[in-house]
Amino acid sequence: MVGKNIKGKMKMPIPLIKKAAQKYTWHDYLTWPAEERWEIIDGVAYNMTPAPSVRHQIVAQCH
């Protein structure tokens, strides 16, 4: 989810969190699809947003 802050500037996206009663481990991480980017912090899985493309960065600098 991306939004704008009070000054109208873009703020960082909020990563999605895998909801579960359990804490995830490195072993769990190894079973997840390789095309999805996840990070585990203290047993909580966060879906990481891909980095913007070079084209996106160039266009964003023009505005």
Image (cartoon, rainbow, N blue to C red):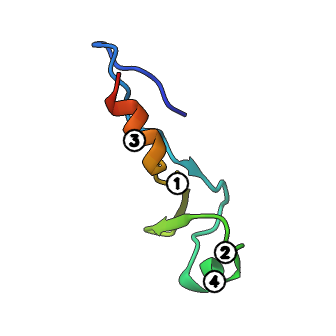
Mark 1 residue crowding within 10 angstroms, few (<14) / some (14–19) / many (20+): few
Residue beneath the point at 58% across and 52% down? 17
- First in sequence: mark 3 vs mark 2: 2
Q: CA distance from mark 3 to mark 2?
A: 25 Å
Q: Mark 2 sits on what residue?
A: 34
Residue 42: image quadrant is bottom left
Q: CA distance from mark 4 to mark 3?
A: 31 Å
Frontmost residue, 61 versus 26: 61
Frontmost residue, 20 versus 55: 55
Task: Give the number of the disc on residue 30.
Answer: 4
Between tags 4 and 3, which lies in front? 3
Task: Give the number of the disc on residue 50.
Answer: 1
Q: Mark 3 sits on what residue?
A: 57
Q: CA distance from mark 1 to mark 2?
A: 13 Å
Q: Amino acid at mark 2?
A: Ala
Frontmost residue, 62 versus 1: 62
The local secondary structure at tag 4 comes to: helix
Q: Amino acid at mark 4?
A: Leu
Q: CA distance from mark 2 to mark 4?
A: 8 Å
Residue beneath the point at 55% across and 34% down? 1
